[in-house]
Amino acid sequence: MSSEIEKLNSNTEVVSFRAMFAMLWRTKWFIIIFTGLVSVATVFYAISLPNVYRASAIYLPKSADDSGALSKLAGQFGGLASMAGINLGGGGADKTQAALEFMRSRAFLQSFIEKRDLTVPLLAAEGWDQTSRKLIIVPELYDEASQKWVRAAPPGFQVIPSAWEAYDTLNKMISVNEQSKKGFIKIEIEYYSPDLAAQWLGWLVEDLNAYWKAREHEQTQKSIAFLTKQAENAQLSELRAVFYQLIAEQTKTTILSEVSDEVLLETVAPIVVPEQKSAPSRALLCIVGFVLGFVLSCILGLFYCTFRPVKKG
């Protein structure tokens, strides 16, 4: 009995596949034409896409443990130092994480856009001319001759765009890959221009280091001022010695930070101007377009044959 049921199911499957193949064969010209049109449209779309280049560099985060002598005092005077807002060791990973999050923040990137005057290349460019090595600017958005914005302002915005509008565009270009096991950080920027992608990446890390250097310097000066006041008011000579030791270490840290501008991210592999595009993959787009066109045409053909069956007789 079971063998007869299996045979019946097998025959049913064969009939179903034959019927499906017959319906597809009935709409073969539709499938061929539809797949061809979708494939051609995909080819034209892939050709119209501008090349995008990726500039990257590898950095070594400078953790709080790099302070050397300060970290040796952590066990002895950690509680006392925390009163002055001093970090005597540890938290290097947290500091790096906070800095990378700040680098992607609206406050930092908007300030970066305004400082480096990136509004036009971010919002008005549509490609890169390899021959002249200049950006291709959309004339309907920005007039290069008069150097004025001529766009139709979006609702809620002015004709001249602000860094607020350009933030999302720049943020999408930046990618950060933290290789925690190796202790490195890889930062990349993708843009139409290989030259500008490399330049912007250098500026980005430079400005981040400069901001962090100024921040650390300000905090150190506040700590030194607090410790100096506490040392002057201390009654016990032992406690006064501790305060002066902390002041000395803070002063040493301040002096050493002036040696290099890379106080947060130290360059391991410098930025190289890319010569090959990173996107788009036009061949892959064409293959995907062909497959989607073929599958969609088959589905439409089956629906057509289902609702428009062949009349017998």
Image (cartoon, rainbow, N blue to C red):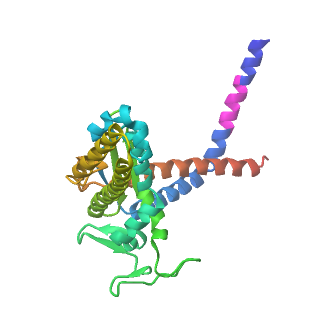
Residue at 29% x, 44% y is 244
Span colored in magenta: 10-19
Q: Is residue 98 left or right of residue 15?
A: left
Q: Is residue 15 above or below residue 223?
A: above
Residue positioned 63% across, 40% down in the render: 21
Q: Quadrant of residue 179?
A: top left
In this view, the residue in front, 92 or 171, is 92
Residue 24 as seen in the image, left or right of residue 40 = right
User: What is the residue that sits farthest to the front in this orientation?
Assistant: 235
> Residue 283: x, y in percent?
39, 51
Closest to the observer, 68 or 247:
247
Residue 161 at x, y percent in the picture? 47, 76
| Image quadrant containing the N terminus | top right
- The residue that appears at 67% across and 47% down in the rendered structure is 302
Asked if residue 52 can be seen in this view, the reply is: no
Residue 133 is situated, as x and y percent measured from the top left of the image, at: 25, 69
Instruction: Identify the main secondary structure in magenta.
Output: helix
Per the image, is 228 magenta?
no
Asked if residue 235 shows in the view, the reply is yes
